Amino acid sequence: MGGLNRRDFLKLLGLGTAGIVGIPVVSSAAELPAPVPGSYRLKRAKETASICAYCGCGCGLIVYSEDGKVVSIEGDPDHPINEGALCPKGISISDANTIVAENRQRVQNPRRVTQVLYRAPGSSKWEVKDWDWALKTIASRVKETRDASFETTDAAGVTVNRTQAIAHLGSASLDNEENYVIHKLLRALGVINIDHHARL
């Protein structure tokens, strides 16, 4: 510290603190500079309130869209959970929908999956299917697997009513209510292999 003793250091620290306290602070919104008319880049965009899908916190978002396309996403300042703040994942959520092209303009992400894709066993190509087909197929395969593997008693004769041929891996994108309903469904099916990717 070059000859600076403890007493001198504390004096300088006190002077610095007093200087910071003496800086005038803007006390009201009326003293803030007014925005330049026509400068707001989202003035024509439609605002839609939404929820971030990255985890189960439920942070609020405001999605801005023009002509049916997302142009910007920001935190919702009126939301009680995040009060406008977003984590690094939440702030980049718009990248799931759009990407920055070579001309530095945001364009629709061409790799975003927007349809049901199905690849049959042994096939080397994906087929586009509709949601009705997908949901019916998943339900029938779950029922078929459950019926073929359901155990009412174990080797010791204890009633177990379970299937060990189906497992479920939970997602942190789900909130408590969704997790509750999914867990009830899985238990009703007799699924016992239930885990969560974040082990919460």
Image (tube, helix red, strand yellow):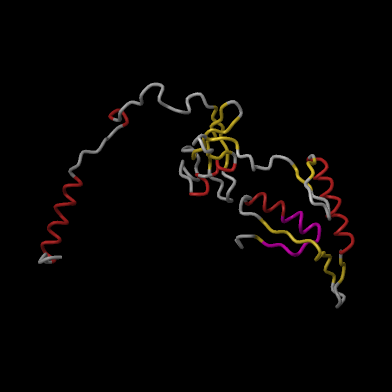
Q: Dividing the picture into quarters, in which one does residue 40 lie?
A: top left
- Between 185 and 113, the one nearer to me in the picture: 113
**Image quadrant for the C terminus?**
bottom right
Image quarter where the N terminus lies is: bottom left
Q: Position of residue 60 (x, y in %)?
A: 53, 41
Name the residue at 60% across, 60% down: 198
Q: Residue furthest bottom?
A: 156
Placement of 194 over or under 28, stated as above or below: below
* 18 drawn magenta: no
Q: Which residues are magenta?
A: 183-195
Which residue corresponds to the image point at 46% horizontal and 42% vertical from the top-left?
Answer: 83
Residue for point 65% across, 49% down: 177
Q: Quadrant of residue 144?
A: bottom right
Side of 4 relative to 59 (left or right): left
Image coordinates of residue 43 in percent, x first then y, are: 47, 25
Q: Is residue 189 magenta?
A: yes
